[in-house]
Image (cartoon, rainbow, N blue to C red):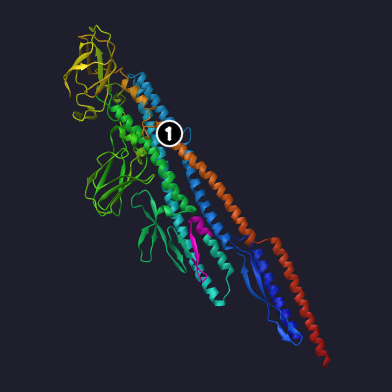
Amino acid sequence: MAGSIYGISVSALNASQVGLATAEHNIANANTPGFNRQEVGLAVRQAQFTGSGYIGQGVDVSTVKRVYSEFLGRQVLQEQGLSAQLNTYYAQIQQIDNMVADPNSGLSPAIQEFFSSVNNVSNNPESQPARQAMINDANYLTSRFQSLNQRMMDMNSSVNSQIAYSVTQINSYAKQISALNQNIIMAQSANNQLPNDLMDQRDQLVTQLNQEIKATVVKQTDGSFSVFVGNGQPLVVGAQTFNMTTQMSATDPSKLDVAYTYFNGATTPIQQSSLQGGNLGGLLAFRDEALANSQNALGSVGMGIAGTFNQQHQLGQDMNGALGVNFFVQPVPQVTSNTANTGTAVIGASVASAAGYTALTGSDYSLKFTGGVYTLTRLSDNTVVYNNAAFPPAAPVDGLTLSTVSGAIAAGDSFLIRPTVNGARDIAPAISDPSLIAAAVPVRTNATLANLGTGKISAATVNQPNPVTPNPAHPLTDLNLQQPVTITFTSPTTFNVTGTGVGLPAVGVAYTPGANISYNGWTLQITGAPVANDTFTVGSNTNATTDSSNALLLAGLQTQNTLAGGTTSYQGAYSQMVSYVGNKTRELQVTSQAQTSMVEQSVQAQQSFSGVNLDEEAANLLRYQRAYQAAGKALQIANTMFDTILSLGR
């Protein structure tokens, strides 16, 4: 009997010791990240049958288990992954928001100052200081474009570096998880018990991995984890790991793409949009959405200003009597061939004439040749805008004229077309001589002093050229633009037009007061009531240093809706970009704060279930201490009983 009491007491002492050790372990790791509270699992020993019935034999420690909820754990992973993506996206887009919305260093003040200078030239076309100020403000405007674009390019470089670092972290976590998988399998197979602390470490690594990228975890029957990312690419399978890497984008050399490396060393890009969640998902979303859209939008404004201003400037005349030239260096669309192309085709893209700058969307485009068909897709909304076996398109597409510059295309070849990405980088003043500002109109109208009627002739405006007689030196003007033309009324309702040009001479033209009269690339109006033999002339505008007709038209471009399909002005288009960035920043601020709150609630729910409660553990210490003391007392009693038995034999 004493032996039985000894055994029971020893089992109780052992159970109490394990309970004390477990409680102390919990207390020691109360602040350890990823630690889950542990509990002692006790089992009653098999009772011994006697004539008096079954007598208990004590207690066994069956296991030490961790208190863990897979449901709560997965919920925390999901919330933390999304929170990390939103926080990273928000931190990045704040940089653009602070830059473009700055009232002093933004673009709007520079546009306003430049057009104020244009207005000053229109008021004083002969003033050299006013013209020089216009050149200076053009330099300031283009430098602001270039500075803002450079900041965005620097952000792109920074994001590329962060993407590479994030991929390195992901690979490191994957290797550590696979190593723990192996250790956990070995520990379980050795003693058929769960290695709680190793499992906590693995769960913590999965949490850290999930903060870098959204990972799907599948628990295997042997206790190991299989981890998948993207569209189901395996990252960890048991003790095996598959590396991710970065490589230059096949279509855009300014970007790093995340790729997947197989055991044979082959590397293939992962669909970037599939890499959701975590810091990596936030970086990719920011780069491919907010940053790309902002750079394209800024470039669209730059290309729009350069294109439309140049077109109007070429329709004018400078102080030397020559037709206007480009005022700004004109940025051009960028076309990049996919590095995997097997053909030799080089595709060209340009903005189509005057209306092209109005039609530009600010989107990038993908051109693919598959199945004998050319497919052009607008990437901003994934809309196919051209799908035909013939190339190039007969008409401009979204303001773009496409062409095959050289070489032959092969099946499967693709190209990335970025019409406006370099618009802010490449815009610059094309002239530095103030006398080359084309403030005047190259043709002058005049009414003969001998006219007896009340007819009045307006100033002429320059049209786009007649395709039959283009001016090779100035493609936006007619070859006969400055040829002398005479309009002679033969009656109050008809007139003849004499001179050199297409459609001239013209006899018996019906007169409608105020109607457009167009020849040789100019348009004018005659009003009032001319009489027979009244004569009006149109000719070259010589010595027109005081003429500011074209400068007025240039100044008017500031408020004209020349961009975004003719719906907004230069400053309006820039304001739309600022508004987009501001609204997106505010949206991310609100959603990231809300998601952070969700994470806190999920972690709190998890900790309430799995976390260490120091008050509870203190009570456990006292409970196990008392149990240990009681077991020791029982052992003492058993010893006294044994001594009594021994004394009987003396």
Q: Secondary structure at mark 1?
A: loop
Q: Quadrant of residue 137?
A: top left
Q: Nearer the viewer, residue 568 or 437?
A: 568
The question of residue 174 being in magenta is answered with no
Magenta span: 207-225
Question: Of residues 98 and 528, which is closer to you in this image?
Answer: 528
Measuring from the top left, give residue 273's x and y in whole percent.
42, 52
Q: Is residue 130 above or below residue 562?
A: above
The residue sitting at the bottom extreme is: 650
Instruction: Specify whether 363 is left or right of 178.
Output: left
Whether residue 633 is visible, yes or no, is: yes
Q: How many marks?
A: 1
**Horizontal and vertical percent position of residue 149:** 40, 40
> Quadrant location of the C terminus?
bottom right
Is residue 53 positioned above or below 135 on the image?
A: below
User: Can you give x and y, in whole percent of width and height, for residue 352 in the image?
Assistant: 28, 36
Residue at position x 43%, y 51% in the image: 161
Q: Quadrant of the N terminus?
A: bottom right
220 in the magenta segment: yes
At x 41%, y 38%, the residue is 147
Q: Is residue 91 left or right of residue 489?
A: right
Task: Work out whether residue 129 or residue 58 is closer to the camera in this orientation and state it.
Answer: 58
Residue of label 1: 107
Tell me which amino acid carries mark 1. Answer: Leu
Q: Residues within 10 Å of mark 1 (few under 14, many from 20)?
A: many
Position above or below: 507 against 302? above
